[in-house]
Amino acid sequence: MFIHWRQINHNAADVIDVDTWEYGFIYSNEWTHQWTDYVTRTTGRFTSAARCIDLEGVSLVKHYSRAATKRDGKIMNEMQNCYPQMLENYYLCNSPDWMHLIWVLVKPILPQRVLEKTKMISPQNHKQLHKYMDEHMIPVEIGGPNQTPPMYW
């Protein structure tokens, strides 16, 4: 899954009620679970998901909402309890400099399972993604050759 963070309306609760927002997370996770389960059963190889979050152009002022962080954290904890083995890693791509500073500061207090599943990568070290996709599928935005945006795949 590829997420362009700057394109998300983090204050969607102003437009969409919290229950509807939560259902979107649930349906997305259920679809991902069914797909990874299908691949696991047909290949005989345990399959889990990876999420690439493109943080290019993200501004702390424009893209941070305390209410949204609280809401999304609650939903993500519920999803982790429902689908504990589905998500293998989050890849934070093109993160701004200020995010590296925050990462260094909060890393010591984060749970070990969060640290194990969260990786910051740059376009120069996108090779970690080869575990999940061929080189030719990696989008240009994160250092690969694929000109087609993931939403059109």
Image (cartoon, helix red, strand yellow):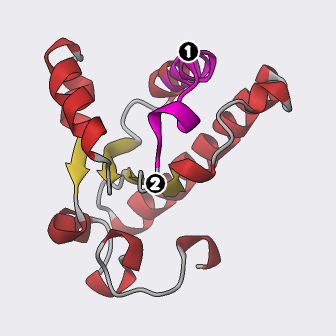
Reading the chain from its start, which is encountered first: label 1 or label 2?
2
Residue at the spot of label 1: 70
Q: Residue farthest to the front?
A: 61
Confirm whether residue 83 shows in the render. Answer: yes
How far apart, in angstroms, are the residues tagged by discs 1 and 2? 22 Å
- Depicted 7 relative to depicted 112: above or below: below
Provide the major secondary structure of the magenta segment. helix
- Is residue 80 or residue 20 the one in the foreground? 20
Residue tagged by mark 2?
57
Who is closer to the viewer here, 133 or 48? Answer: 133
Left or right: residue 88 versus residue 31 is: left
- Give the class, few, some or many, for how many residues have Cα within 10 Å of label 1's Cα (few <14, many ≥20): few
In this orientation, does residue 139 appear?
Answer: no
Residue 14 % position (x, y)? 82, 26
Dot in front, 1 or 2:
2
Q: Position of residue 73 (x, y in %)?
A: 51, 20
